[in-house]
Amino acid sequence: MPELSPAAFDQLFRQARTYNAFSGEVDDATLRRLYDLVKWGPTTANTCPARFVFVTSPQARARLGPALDEGNYAKTMAAPVVVIVAYDMAFYEKSPVLFPHVDARSWFDTKPEAALETIALRNGSLQGAYLILAARALGLDCGPMSGFDNAKVDAAFFAGTTIRSNFLVNLGRGDPASIFPRSPRLGFEEACRIE
Amino acid sequence: MPELSPAAFDQLFRQARTYNAFSGEVDDATLRRLYDLVKWGPTTANTCPARFVFVTSPQARARLGPALDEGNYAKTMAAPVVVIVAYDMAFYEKSPVLFPHVDARSWFDTKPEAALETIALRNGSLQGAYLILAARALGLDCGPMSGFDNAKVDAAFFAGTTIRSNFLVNLGRGDPASIFPRSPRLGFEEACRIE
């Protein structure tokens, strides 16, 4: 495969930013196109534990609002769409469909909850990152955040289920006036080694 | 921003596959280019907890081998590069550099280990997904896997440190003969809802 273009590297990584204000609308067809990219990303034994709630209506926003940290409230309430990136702790119930050639369900369904949590958080977070980069590939901007009360979101959106919230992503067309100067990153030698 | 091309969607998501055999070499300059894309991806308060070991030498492979599940051994020993995607539990030690405008270190350094583990695993996994997609953007193929003994990898590569292994990614040029028929994915209605 060839490399993608420098412009694509910029759009996905180098020039992409976490925006704090957005304009535009994100229609349902775009959300379906987004998922149709995200779903192909790899997960452990194709478990696909992530579940996504696209919060768009005033009613759903009103349920989300009380869970947000103060600094995230106004920007999240104003975003065209807020994605609740979550994961299903009973993800292995789908294994007979998602990994049909072996009994993958039995690899998971006797594990203790802490081990399942690790698997769901690892793979659900991978899928959350696929969502961020797929949104950028579709020309959208993102505002991902962890500053909220997970238990409140779970009570408001996932009561009586095995689904748990992971993080949130605001989606729309980013307002360049809403970003801060870019923070530093670790150099190669600080974050990596070649052995 | 415009959308990326359909060919880019294919390369990143729709036609990308998890390969079980690879050819080609991945030189150190490519690994540095890879990190120089990955590093820009967003993390909680720019914590950037991921650490990456690029296993390339016979000596390092020999230390990794005993930690691998039987089914992952041969393909991983033969891959041009194996990336150990890890995270630093003491990630907040870098906060004064990475998030210099506030005292972000104090948000983390009194949290219990379980809470830090959740933050490191969530954000370290996001960065692992950025690595998978950045590799694909550079024209490389990936073989990510969780089938190994994390404690053995930690003992072999991270003894005496606060770094913990998360998952592994084989890197190279994928051999199309090494992939299985594609497994199903969840439909939009099974994985998503719009509220």
Image: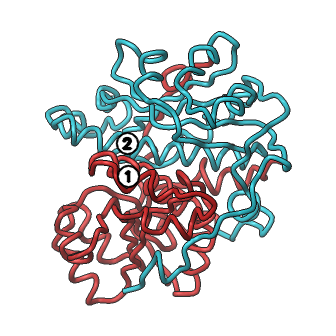
Chain colours: A red, B cyan
Left/right of residue A152 with respect to residue B145 in the rendered view: left
Pointers 2 and 1 in contact (CB under 8 A)? yes
x 71%, y 63%: residue: B182
x 75%, y 27%: residue: B78
| Residue assigned mark 1 | A121
**Label 2 vs label 1: CA separation?**
7 Å
Figure check: A23 above or below B127: below
| Residue B98 visible to the viewer | yes
Q: Under tag 2, what secondary structure?
A: helix
Question: Which numbered disc covers residue B121?
Answer: 2
Protein chain holding label 2: B
Left/right of residue B138 with respect to residue A168 in the rendered view: right
| Residue A1 visible to the viewer | no
Residue B131 lies in what quarter of the image?
top right
Protein chain holding label 1: A
Left/right of residue B9 with respect to residue A143 in the rendered view: right
**Relative to the observer, which residue lies in front, B71 or A3?**
B71
Percent position of residue A70, x then y: 17, 63
